Image (cartoon, helix red, strand yellow):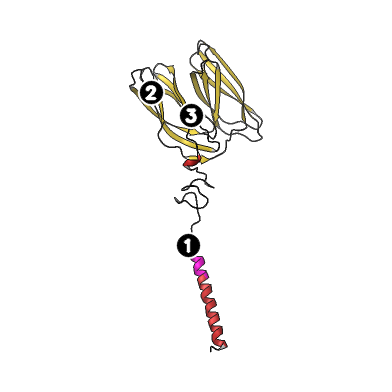
Amino acid sequence: MASWAQKRRFMYGGTVVAIILIIVGLWSFKTFYKPPTCFDNIMNGDEQGVDCGGSCQKLCASSFVTPSVAWTSFEPVASGLYNVAAYIINQNITGTAMNVPYHMVLYDNKGVEIVDVPGAVTLPPNRNTLAYIPIVSTGKIPVYRVFFEFTQFPDWKRQADTLGALKITDKRYTEDQSGSSLLVTLANSSVYTIGKFSVYVVLSDAKSNVIGFSKTIVDGVGPHATVTAPFTWPMSHNGAVISEEVLPVVE
């Protein structure tokens, strides 16, 4: 039978071993354990896919609606120079995609490609926007059709609409034989300053045909303040403009 001294030595030894194991375990945990992140190329934590969904800012492919293109259009601004645009609908309420690359191809009346122009567009949350390229040169070849295509899938991020407090309070379109203009007044109904944003406009006739479009940049608008966004065209639309759609977006 073991003596009390032997039992005590055994107890002390067991305690020391237990302490060593705890220390080694803690060291191993701190050394080798890596907490889940949204950038480790592993589906872990509360993610719904690899580094997407859950608490990650990036959204999974199954979480967003694919943007759609309602129309493409072109307008001449001078001999052989055109503005071209595509109207993009984004139905994702809290999904935004920054600088999505695309290209627009301009064709002549025989279906022959004139020029292929690359660009990038930001798709703001729950807002429609324009992919807009101004002053495209065609070497004086008349444009008959424009083709639009994304060249990369949008990389969606979770983001709320930052322009919810921005209201369109007035639109004043005028024209004469030398040109046309539109003044859009926007009001900030919040107590916070709205930073720099872009404003696109689309002009349509009585049959809802697109007959003009343009873009301007607003540096910002203060709390409970208003700002005017001006647009001009170097041609008259001959009284055909019936409606003006205004698309403010953060890019």
Classed neighbour count for the residue bearing mark 1: other residues with Cα under 10 Å, few (<14), some (14–19), many (≥20): few
Tell me where residue 133 appears, x and y as whole percent.
44, 26
User: Dot 2 corresponds to which residue?
Assistant: 106
Classed neighbour count for the residue bearing mark 2: other residues with Cα under 10 Å, few (<14), some (14–19), many (≥20): many
Q: Which mark is residue 88?
A: 3
Q: Kindly identify the residue that appears in the image at 53 percent across and 73 percent down.
A: 19
Does the CB distance between marks 1 and 2 fall below 8 Å? Answer: no
Q: Is residue 86 visible?
A: no
Q: Return the residue nearer the eye: 66 or 201.
A: 66
* Count of marks placed on residues: 3
User: Dot 1 corresponds to which residue?
Assistant: 31
Between the C-alphas of marks 1 and 2, the distance is 58 Å
Mark whose residue sits in front, 3 or 2: 3
Question: What is the three-letter code of the residue carrying label 2?
Answer: Leu
Between the C-alphas of marks 3 and 1, the distance is 49 Å
Mark whose residue sits in front, 3 or 1: 3
Q: Is residue 153 visible?
A: yes
Q: Kindly identify the residue that appears in the image at 56 percent across and 84 percent down.
A: 8
Q: Is residue 111 above or below residue 9?
A: above
